[in-house]
Amino acid sequence: MNPLFPLTAATLVLLLGACADTSPGGKAVSARHERFEEMGAAMKAIGGELEKDNATSATVRQSADRLAALAPQVKGWFPAGSGPQDGKRTDAKAEIWTRQAEFGAAATRFEAAAVALKAAADAGDAAKIRAAVQTVGAACKACHQTFKED
Ligand code: HEC
């Protein structure tokens, strides 16, 4: 392989970063990426605590709080103009905008799961927390399977 390739790829990433899309749609893409990363980090933190048998820890409570706070916002992270059909660099599928009711239902299922997780975490009920985390994870996955590119 060309030994210069890694350097070239790194340069390309820098260049793409430098000409970030500052249109409203482009900003929506960047903003939702940050929020989704945050949700991923919260799920990872909870998973780590469950592995250590710390289901009722402050980390779990705080992460569950964050997920429950972000969940109702998800639908609003996909305004018109922020999809692949608008030329945006995104893993969001155009189906989000053509099958809005279905997308909304997936977001609502996730929201309900996140609220249940927060309730279990607030109650300090380890068994319920474990079950609720499974449901939340399934809701993330279900939406990704239909509405996100791999
Ligand atoms: C209702 C649909 C939906 C739900 C629910 C959902 N996601 Fe996503 N997620 C998406 C879509 C669509 C994208 C692609 C966004 C883009 O590239 O613009 C995405 C992207 C991501 C990304 C990648 C972000 C990046 O920087 O590229 C992560 C990480 C992620 N989601 C984690 C989660 C986690 C964890 C959950 C559950 C706690 C979750 N998502 C729930 C639809 C959803």
Image (spheres, rainbow, N blue to C red):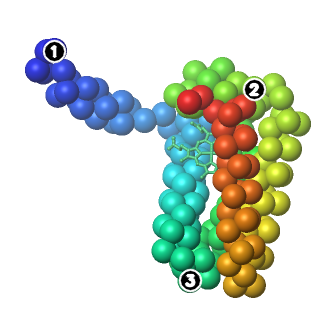
> Quick one: quadrant of the N terminus?
top left
The residue furthest left is 3
In the rendered image, is residue 81 in sight?
A: no
- Mark 3 — residue? 58
| Spatial separation of the CA atoms under disc 2 and disc 3 | 38 Å
The mark nearer the N terminus, 1 or 2, is: 1
Kind of residue indicated by mark 1: Met
The mark nearer the N terminus, 2 or 3, is: 3
In the rendered image, is residue 37 in sight?
A: yes
Query: With respect to residue 132, does 56 lie above or below?
Result: below
Q: Nearer the viewer, mark 1 or mark 2?
A: 1
Q: Nearer the viewer, residue 54 or 73?
A: 54
> Quick one: quadrant of the C terminus?
top right
- Specify the label residue 95 is tagged with: 2
- Identified at 28% across, 34% down, the residue is 14
| Spatial separation of the CA atoms under disc 1 and disc 2 | 38 Å
- Identified at 83% across, 29% down, the residue is 99
- Mark 1 — residue? 1
- Identified at 48% across, 34% down, the residue is 21
Q: Quadrant of residue 148?
A: top right
- The image quadrant where one finds ligand 1 is top right
The residue furthest top is 1
In the image, residue 32 lies at what x, y percent? Answer: 59, 47
Kind of residue indicated by mark 3: Ala
Q: Quadrant of residue 73?
A: bottom right
| 98 sits to left or right of 14 | right
Query: With respect to residue 24, does 11 lie above or below?
Result: above
Q: Nearer the viewer, mark 2 or mark 3?
A: 3
Kind of residue indicated by mark 2: Glu
